[in-house]
């Protein structure tokens, strides 16, 4: 009996190196499309290590991850909205990936804003997983019906407003423009701030220590939106949409909308009937800009499956992995492969890649409190400024943002 | 708390017999007490302990004494949350009673079909607040919902009104949802009070020539003090702790104007991860509720005994 | 004489009319949200996001909405099972524990009895939202987080003050003579409880059970914070994902179907146990 046991143990030990398969627990936020899910599926089909995905609602991910760490139940890795990487890295809960990352031959060509946000005090804690930029989309069929040139992208907000008016005239339930205005901080930072960024203004100072909301550029941007709301070019539902109906253009009844590059993939696969064009978002003075968002891949400190995690990430960065990601709407994270990856895919995705060059991302440890939280000052500001008392909105939000920044120092 | 111990009073009061009885009694209540102590009382004490720390969700807590409490006094958002909670509690309680009292009088009558009506009124009570909020989120949606398209179709409003866009409309939509959901419960409590009024008394006062309103004022109301107090306490404490409906239906309302105190605690604890401050806020709410409950009960009971 | 009689009859008719008229209108107001949601959930997929005016399916009945709901999370059956496990577990544990405690508080004399009872009741005044973080940290240490059993324990604890109060009142209401007779026959303690008293406090048990079931079935914040993997999510957590939208839009069909799925068991349980439920509630309110 004992001998038998010894033999099997020995056998197990001998086989182990070959058959040793890890299952990586990984969380991903829901609502970023299918690209990552498909990549994981492909990886699991061809590798011994498996990745087990748990989809967590986007709004709960940070909280759930933080509570899970506190409770020692954290997944090995997760795909985290890149703007959160600084604050999690600062809290010392993430695995330091610096030396491994720098040893990757293509390290220099990984999306720079992702790496910048993944870096805290010269150590790298997060690496790009998916790249997402904001872009401007228009419905070509509605353009045609309204007598506009369906292939001519609007270049200024005057043009957008004029086009919206023509489209609105098409019918009772057809509207010229859409945005999620019901206090969706995450939507508005993504779609609305490019209006001021392109014109050289920002909502936070470069070091993130001062709120700089009250600028002429921001006032101008607010005016454009207010004007369109006043002229009834925006559906009334927008006023209470907290982001759940972000992709309203898919109904075919919205003429123009700012959206994320991942939506290009979603629209192509889920709504092939929709004939739309995309371009860069013009700022208030016409110079385009964009928000570089997406997810960083972070590893929980102390995970026992570090090597398996690295193996998986290398697969994501391979041409095969990048191609699957792109096919389902995520932009390439490796600049050196971008052209190869996008070859043969929808040309509209190229606009999303072009946006990376002009895109910005705010770097602040209080991103959630300031911007993303449904009850933060930015969310309240966008709603109040566009639908309510503009002057008060500026004063309140400026003061509150500064208060939050100061409290955290 | 007037339970009598049968064995103690009917037989000889021998000390060791009493001790044995006490032990048995403690054994019977032990499972309940252990659960409540471990999963409720201890966490409350833990909350109090946490409130004296700067306690980030990640990383080490540091002792800061009463600083979380002093911060509270200069926190405008805390005052806003308190103000809104009071506003909501006041209005929703009045509206619930305005519906529940007539409903209770309606279903108190001995007529045909009354049990059916009562069941219908009560039905929303049994669904969860989360389900009810989800349901009404849909019903109140401007594009895919029920209310505003219906009003437009009936010609009540020209065009559709976005019920969740402005503070007042959204607030009254939520009040309507809560009344729909809760009024049946309050109705039942009041009904028990109405039914406990002896029929002879009502008859006697009627013979004495008391008018309907007089009967209500001088007979029904005083006799219903206890159920009224109970209904009031449940309604007020429930409203002060409101969270689900605002979270699900308006995410805190247009421009954060519907942040209740519990919502603020949840935000501070689970969105901003200021667990220490969140704990201090929880303690504040706890104190407010205790004071309110005691005051409410005391006021109503005292008057009742004088009458 | 005849004139007085017709007068009386007319007044009675008017009274009846006013009564049934107002009661019917009110009933309708209370029922409409249910009816609309129920009917609308059987519309075809593409209709789901158009307003339910009229609410019934105009282009034929379909289960599209329910099929759509099944594509969220780990599938609707898994989440329904989770909700059932938690709810039924809560019912059983709550009934047993509160039965014992109610009996203890009603029939035994022991030191600190009133203090303990008040302590138990006082927990009703504390928002449990505020103790979720300590609970989470404790559960993590005990390995009880992300477990349906852990969640059940919390639900039982939250049910206890009300349930013990109910059961104590139920036992208090049982005439002492019945017990005396049993005692003379030598039946006491646990046997007295299960053989003699239990049948007499069944209405109380039914109340406790139905409240435990409904509250556990409907609770969502604790579940949201404690459960972290997909396959453990209870129905309300699944529904928050539906409400949050997918791919930039809310699937209203799935929301309608989900609400119906969440509501139907509550209504069935209530209608089946309504008699006991109301009786128990009434007994509780009068005390």
Image (tube, coloured by chain):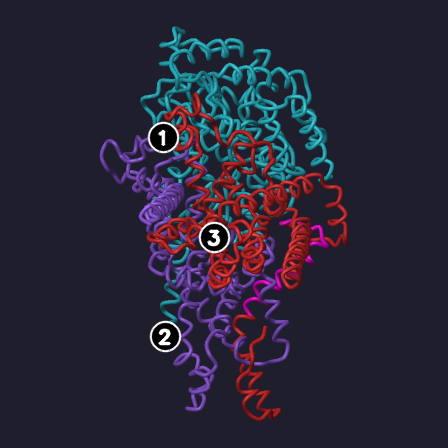
Chain colours: A cyan, B red, C purple
Magenta-tinted stretch:
B34-57
Q: Residues within 10 Å of mark 1 (few under 14, many from 20)?
A: many
Quarter of the rendering occupied by the N terminus of chain A? bottom left
Residue pointed to by mark 2: A3
Secondary structure of the residue carrying tag 2 is: helix
Q: Chain of mark 2?
A: A
At a point 32% along the width and 42% down the height, the residue shown is C38
Residue pointed to by mark 1: C51
Q: Looking at this rendering, what residue extends furthest in the front direction?
A: C1
Residue pointed to by mark 3: B187
At a point 58% along the width and 75% down the height, the residue shown is B2
Separation of marks 3 and 1 at Cα, in angstroms: 32 Å
Whether tag 2 and tag 1 are in contact, CB under 8 A, the answer is no
Q: Position of residue A103 (x, y in %)?
A: 55, 38
Q: Position of residue A339 (x, y in %)?
A: 43, 22
Q: Residues within 10 Å of mark 2 (few under 14, many from 20)?
A: few
Q: Position of residue C75 (x, y in %)?
A: 34, 47
């Amino acid at each position: 009996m004992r001998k038998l046991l010894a033999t099997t143990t020995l056998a197990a030990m001998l086989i182990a190196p070959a058959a040793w398969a890890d299952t990586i627990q990984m969380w991903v936020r829901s609502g970023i499309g299918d690209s990552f899910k498909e990549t994981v599926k492909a990886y699991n089909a061809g590798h011994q290590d498996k990745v087990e995905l748990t989809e967590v609602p986007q709004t709960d991910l940070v909280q759930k991850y933080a509570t899970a760490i506190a409770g020692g139940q954290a997944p090995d890795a997760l795909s985290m909205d890149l703007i959160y990487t600084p604050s999690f890295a600062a809290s010392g809960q993430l695995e330091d990936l610096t030396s491994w990352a720098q040893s990757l031959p293509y390290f220099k060509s990984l999306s720079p804003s992702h790496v910048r946000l993944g870096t805290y005090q010269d150590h790298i804690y997060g690496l790009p997983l998916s790249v997402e930029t904001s872009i401007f989309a228009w419905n070509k069929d509605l353009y045609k019906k309204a007598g506009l040139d369906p292939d001519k992208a609007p270049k200024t907000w005057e043009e957008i407003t004029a086009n919206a008016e023509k489209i609105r005239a098409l019918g009772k339930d057809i509207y010229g423009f859409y945005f999620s205005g019901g206090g969706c901080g995450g939507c508005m930072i993504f779609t609305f701030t490019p209006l001021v960024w392109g014109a050289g203004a920002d909502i936070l100072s470069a070091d993130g220590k001062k709120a700089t909301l009250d600028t002429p550029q921001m006032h101008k941007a607010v005016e454009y939106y207010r004007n369109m709301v006043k002229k009834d070019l925006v559906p009334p539902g927008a006023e209470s949409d907290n982001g759940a109906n972000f992709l309203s253009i898919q109904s075919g009844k919205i003429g123009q909308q700012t959206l994320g590059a991942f939506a290009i993939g979603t629209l192509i696969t889920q709504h092939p009937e929709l004939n739309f064009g995309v371009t860069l978002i013009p700022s208030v003075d016409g110079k385009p800009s964009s928000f570089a968002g997406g997810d960083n891949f972070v590893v929980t400190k102390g995970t026992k499956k570090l090597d398996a995690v690295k193996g998986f990430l290398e697969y994501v960065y391979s041409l095969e992995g990048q191609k699957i990601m792109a096919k389902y709407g995520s932009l390439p994270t490796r600049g050196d492969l971008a052209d190869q990856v996008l070859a043969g895919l929808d040309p509209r995705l190229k606009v999303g890649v072009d946006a990376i060059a002009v895109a910005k991302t705010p770097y602040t440890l209080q991103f959630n409190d300031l911007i993303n939280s449904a009850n933060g000052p930015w969310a309240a500001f966008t709603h109040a400024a566009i639908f309510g008392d503009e002057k008060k909105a500026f004063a309140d939000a400026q003061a509150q943002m500064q208060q939050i920044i100061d409290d955290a120092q | 708390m007037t339970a009598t111990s049968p064995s103690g009073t009917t037989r000889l009061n021998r000390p060791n017999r009493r001790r044995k009885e006490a032990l048995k009694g403690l054994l019977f209540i032990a499972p309940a007490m252990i659960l409540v102590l471990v999963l409720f009382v201890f966490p409350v004490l833990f909350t109090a302990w946490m409130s004296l720390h700067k306690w980030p969700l990640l990383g080490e807590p540091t002792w800061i004494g009463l600083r979380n409490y002093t911060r509270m006094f200069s926190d405008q958002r805390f005052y806003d949350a308190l103000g809104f909670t009071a506003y909501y509690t006041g209005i929703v309680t009045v509206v619930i009673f305005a519906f529940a009292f007539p409903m209770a009088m309606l279903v108190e009558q001995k007529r045909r079909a009354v049990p059916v009506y009562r069941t219908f009124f009560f039905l929303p009570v049994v669904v969860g607040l989360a389900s009810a909020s989800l349901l009404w989120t849909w019903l109140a949606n401007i594009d895919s919902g029920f209310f505003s398209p219906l009003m437009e179709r009936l010609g009540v409003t020209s065009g559709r009104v976005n019920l969740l866009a402005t503070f007042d409309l959204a607030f009254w939509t939520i009040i309507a949802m809560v009344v729909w959901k809760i009024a049946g419960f309050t109705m039942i409590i009041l009904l028990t009070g109405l039914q406990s009024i002896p029929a002879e008394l009502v008859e006697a006062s009627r013979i004495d020539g008391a008018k309907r309103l007089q009967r209500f004022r001088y007979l029904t109301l005083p006799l219903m003090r206890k159920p009224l107090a109970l209904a009031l306490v449940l309604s007020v404490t429930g409203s002060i702790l409101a969270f689900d409906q605002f979270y699900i239906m308006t995410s805190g309302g247009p421009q954060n104007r519907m942040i209740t105190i519990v919502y603020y605690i949840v935000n501070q604890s689970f969105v901003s991860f200021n667990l220490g401050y969140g704990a201090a806020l929880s303690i504040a709410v706890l104190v407010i509720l205790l004071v309110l409950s005691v005051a409410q009960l005391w006021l109503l009971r005292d008057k009742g005994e004088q009458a | 004489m005849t004139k007085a009689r017709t007068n009386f009859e007319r007044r009675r008719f008017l009274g009846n009319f006013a009564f049934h008229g107002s009661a019917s209108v009110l009933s309708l107001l209370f029922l409409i949200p249910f009816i609309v949601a129920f009917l609308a959930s059987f519309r075809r997929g593409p209709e789901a996001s158009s307003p339910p005016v009229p609410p019934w399916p105009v282009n034929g009945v379909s289960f599209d909405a329910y099929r759509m709901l099944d594509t969220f999370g780990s599938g609707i059956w898994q989440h329904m099972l989770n909700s059932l496990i938690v709810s039924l577990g809560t019912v059983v544990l709550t009934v047993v524990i509160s039965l014992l405690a109610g009996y203890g508080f009603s029939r035994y004399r022991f030191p600190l009895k009133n203090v303990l009872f008040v302590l138990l009741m006082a927990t009703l005044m504390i928002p449990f939202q505020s103790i979720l973080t300590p609970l989470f940290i404790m559960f993590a240490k005990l390995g009880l987080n992300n477990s349906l059993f852990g969640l059940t324990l919390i639900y039982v604890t939250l049910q206890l003050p009300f349930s013990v109060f109910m059961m104590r009142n139920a036992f208090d209401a049982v005439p002492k003579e019945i017990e005396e007779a049993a005692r003379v026959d030598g039946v006491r303690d646990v046997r007295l409880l299960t053989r003699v008293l239990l049948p007499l406090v069944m209405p109380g048990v039914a109340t406790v059970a139905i409240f435990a079931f409904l509250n556990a079935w409907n609770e969502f914040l604790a579940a949201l914070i404690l459960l972290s993997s997909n396959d453990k999510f209870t129905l309300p957590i699944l529904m928050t994902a539906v409400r949050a939208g997918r791919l930039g839009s809310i699937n209203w069909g799935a929301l309608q179907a989900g609400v119906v799925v969440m509501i139907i068991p509550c209504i069935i349980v209530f209608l089946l146990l309504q008699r006991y439920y109301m009786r128990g509630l009434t007994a509780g309110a009068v005390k």
